[in-house]
């Protein structure tokens, strides 16, 4: 108790209970593994005791140890590289989300060995080229390519997280980089899905991905979903069907949960006519909808929308339409009434019953 008190733990009994639970979960492991665990715990407890919330950090550390206990190489890694152990504890202390990421994907621990890579600002052109080469190494292997995309996201997210925790990234820089990461992954996902589409009728698709919301505004957080709209400009009589299949394939690649995790959750409801509308729109149909049928809130949504990847001519067409719509003259009083009506509808659909101020809704 005295040792734990001195190490910064306010409730030694809780600490001992956590350690006892860990020992019960690891009691049947090989003796060599238990020895590594016993050697790892004293320095880990000392480092954890210096964190803002030692008990919560210890519980996250114990959960991670339970997940990796049968992989003695990870225990050896943390025992042999004190800097990696310190970095791990800082990440676990930072947030439960970070702890969950590493616990679900413990191979990320390898990244902690080389701080020069961990703390290096990303060069997205270079990283994109590396990802492209990695995917090229698995031609036609959907499972391997999907896993490669997920590993890339996890490694880059961990690096950004480490730089964030170290105070090296402003909130704006972090959001920008998480958005560039999504852009890179979407571009490769589009390319690989088109390669694997049996009904493709040309080398490069006349198709573009438009990002809305946090992706469109380059405001992504670590766990943000992606608001996407799909556009095409192709006169082929089969175009609608072909690009609908492409969009479905892209959405599947992004959202499928594999052993390597999920790439992104997606929200496709910002397309014309929402969830009841077609999954993909021609540029002509999208233009007609925005100019003649869109609701005010759909025009508002364009203020945080941008071309992400795909055919650059379609991207330029979208940006021109976006500028035209946002600069349209409007009746100020009518606009005020519509915005108020939208807010009332939003409050009715998502009431705040907590009695506390809700930043998003109040």
Image (cartoon, rainbow, N blue to C red):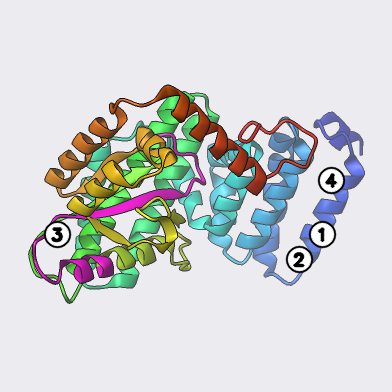
Would you say residue 169 is visible in this rendering? no
- The answer to whether the residues at label 1 and label 2 have Cβ atoms under 8 Å apart is yes
**Residue underneath mark 1:** 21
Q: Looking at the image, is mark 4 or mark 2 earlier in the sequence?
A: 4
Q: Where, by quadrant of the figure, is residue 285 drawn?
A: bottom left
Residue 108 spot, x, y in % from top left? 48, 51
Q: In this rendering, is residue 359 above or below 88?
A: above
Q: Looking at the image, is mark 3 or mark 2 earlier in the sequence?
A: 2
Q: Check if residue 243 falls in the magenta segment.
A: yes
Q: Decide if residue 272 is on the left or right side of residue 348.
A: left
Label 1: how many Cα within 10 Å (few below 14, some 14–19, many 20+): some
Q: Which disc number belongs to residue 355? A: none
Q: Which disc number belongs to residue 15? A: 4
Q: Where, by quadrant of the figure, is residue 260 drawn?
A: bottom left
Q: Secondary structure at mark 4?
A: helix
Residue 187 spot, x, y in % from top left? 25, 51
Which is more toward the observer, 118 or 47? Answer: 118
Q: Which disc number belongs to residue 25? A: 2
Q: Looking at the image, is mark 1 or mark 3 earlier in the sequence?
A: 1
Label 4: how many Cα within 10 Å (few below 14, some 14–19, many 20+): many
- The answer to whether the residues at label 4 and label 2 have Cβ atoms under 8 Å apart is no
Instruction: Name the residue rendered at 43%, 60% in the picture.
Output: 275
Q: Decide if residue 40 is on the left or right side of residue 127.
A: right
Q: CA distance from mark 3 to mark 2?
A: 53 Å
Label 3: how many Cα within 10 Å (few below 14, some 14–19, many 20+): many
Q: Looking at the image, is mark 4 or mark 1 earlier in the sequence?
A: 4
Q: CA distance from mark 4 to mark 3?
A: 58 Å
Which residues are the magenta region? 217-245
Quarter occupied by the C terminus: top right
Q: Which of the two marks, 3 or 2, is nearer to us in this view?
A: 3
Q: CA distance from mark 4 to mark 1?
A: 10 Å
Instruction: Name the residue rendered at 18%, 51% in the picture.
Output: 284
């Amino acid at each position: 108790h005295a040792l734990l008190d001195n190490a910064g733990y306010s409730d030694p009994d809780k600490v001992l209970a956590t350690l006892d639970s860990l020992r019960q979960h690891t009691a049947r492991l090989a003796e060599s593994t238990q020895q590594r665990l016993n050697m790892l715990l004293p320095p880990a407890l000392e480092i954890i005791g210096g964190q803002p919330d030692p008990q919560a950090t210890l519980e996250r550390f114990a959960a991670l140890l339970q997940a990796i206990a049968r992989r003695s190489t990870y225990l050896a890694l943390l025992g042999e590289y004190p800097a990696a152990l310190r970095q791990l504890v800082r990440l676990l202390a930072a947030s439960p989300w970070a702890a969950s990421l590493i616990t679900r994907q413990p191979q990320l621990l390898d990244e902690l060995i080389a701080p020069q890579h961990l703390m290096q600002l990303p060069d997205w052109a270079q990283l994109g080229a590396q990802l492209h080469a990695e995917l090229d190494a698995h031609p036609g292997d959907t499972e391997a390519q999907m896993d490669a995309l997920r590993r890339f996201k996890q490694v880059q997210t961990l690096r950004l997280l480490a730089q964030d925790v170290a105070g090296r990234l402003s909130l704006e820089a972090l959001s920008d980089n998480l958005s560039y990461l999504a852009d890179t992954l979407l571009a490769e996902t589009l390319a690989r899905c088109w390669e694997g589409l049996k009904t493709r009728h040309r080398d490069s698709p006349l198709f573009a991905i438009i990002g809305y919301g946090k992706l469109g505004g380059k405001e992504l957080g670590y766990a943000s979903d992606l608001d996407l709209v799909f556009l095409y400009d192709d006169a082929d009589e089969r175009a609608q069907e072909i690009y609908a299949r492409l969009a479905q394939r892209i959405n599947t690649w992004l959202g499928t949960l594999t052993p390597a995790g999920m790439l992104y959750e997606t929200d496709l409801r910002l397309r014309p006519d929402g969830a009841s509308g077609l999954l993909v729109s021609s540029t002509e149909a999208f233009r007609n909808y925005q100019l003649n049928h869109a609701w005010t809130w759909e025009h508002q949504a364009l203020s945080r929308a941008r071309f992400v990847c795909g055919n650059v001519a379609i991207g330029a067409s979208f940006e021109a339409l976006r500028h035209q719509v946002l600069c349209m003259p409007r009746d100020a009083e009518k606009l005020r009434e519509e915005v108020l009506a939208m807010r009332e509808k939003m409050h009715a659909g998502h009431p705040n019953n907590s009695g506390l101020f809700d930043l998003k809704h109040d």
